[in-house]
Image (spheres, helix red, strand yellow):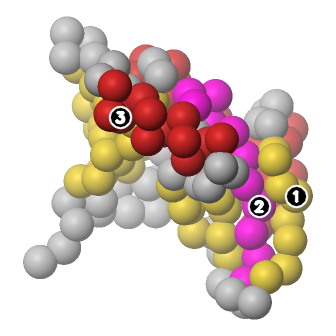
Amino acid sequence: MKIALTGLHVKNPLQAYQFYTEVLGFIKRTYIPEANIAIVASPDEPDGTGLLLEPNDNPIAKAYQEGLCKAGLPALVLGTEDLERDYQRLKRCGVLFRKAPTKTEWGMEAIFEDTCGNLVQLHQVQ
């Protein structure tokens, strides 16, 4: 078995779709406006795990998303081979970082806002 699709609740799926494709560089898989959902994938693994960007329009999803963000916990972890390069590129694109690249006992990390209500961790194994 493998993970085919995983979901991420967002405030606005269209805005998230644009951010994840235009800023982060994810591949556009599906956008279904009538269902208010979008699916993107990593350009490094276009046929790999899809990321379902779904609305937080139910009380449970909204409370969970807001609780994670308020606690400073990332809702998503993205791996990178070169954290400093990706950090600089995203900063040039106007991405708001909550935590600059920092060495941890498990590698390097940086945390940014995805403009859709989530914190995202960039992680590089050292």
Q: CA distance from mark 2 to mark 3?
A: 25 Å
User: For this view, does 95 lie left or right of residue 50?
Assistant: right
- Above or below residue 90? Residue 22 is above
| Amino acid found under the numbered disc labelled 1 | Ala
Q: Earlier in the sequence, mark 2 or mark 3?
A: 3
Q: Which residues are magenta?
A: 107-117
Give the Cα distance between marks 3 and 1: 28 Å
Q: Say whether marks 2 and 3 touch (CB < 8 Å).
A: no
The answer to whether residue 70 is left or right of residue 8 is right
Write the residue at 31% across / 46% down. 7
Occupied quadrant, residue 82 = bottom right
Q: Amino acid at mark 2?
A: Ala
Q: Residue at x 44, y 54 (%)?
A: 42
Residue 44 appears in the rendering: yes
Give the residue at mark 3: 61
| Distance CA(mark 1)–CA(mark 2) | 5 Å
Secondary structure found at label 2: strand
The relative height of residue 113 versus residue 74 in the rendered view (above or below) is above
Sequence-earlier tag: 3 or 1: 3
Q: Callout 3: helix, strand or loop?
A: helix
- Element under disc 1: strand
Residue 8, by quadrant, is top left
> At 45% from the left edge and 19% from the top edge, which residue is drawn?
12
> Mark 3 packing: few (<14 Cα in 10 Å), some, or many (20+)?
some
Please say whether residue 25 is visible from this viewpoint.
no
Decide which of 13, 50 is in the foreground and name it: 13
- The answer to which image quadrant residue 95 occupies is top right
Q: Disc count in the image?
A: 3
Q: In the picture provided, is 86 more to the left or to the right than 55?
A: right
Q: Which residue is mark 2?
A: 110
- Label 1 sits on residue: 100
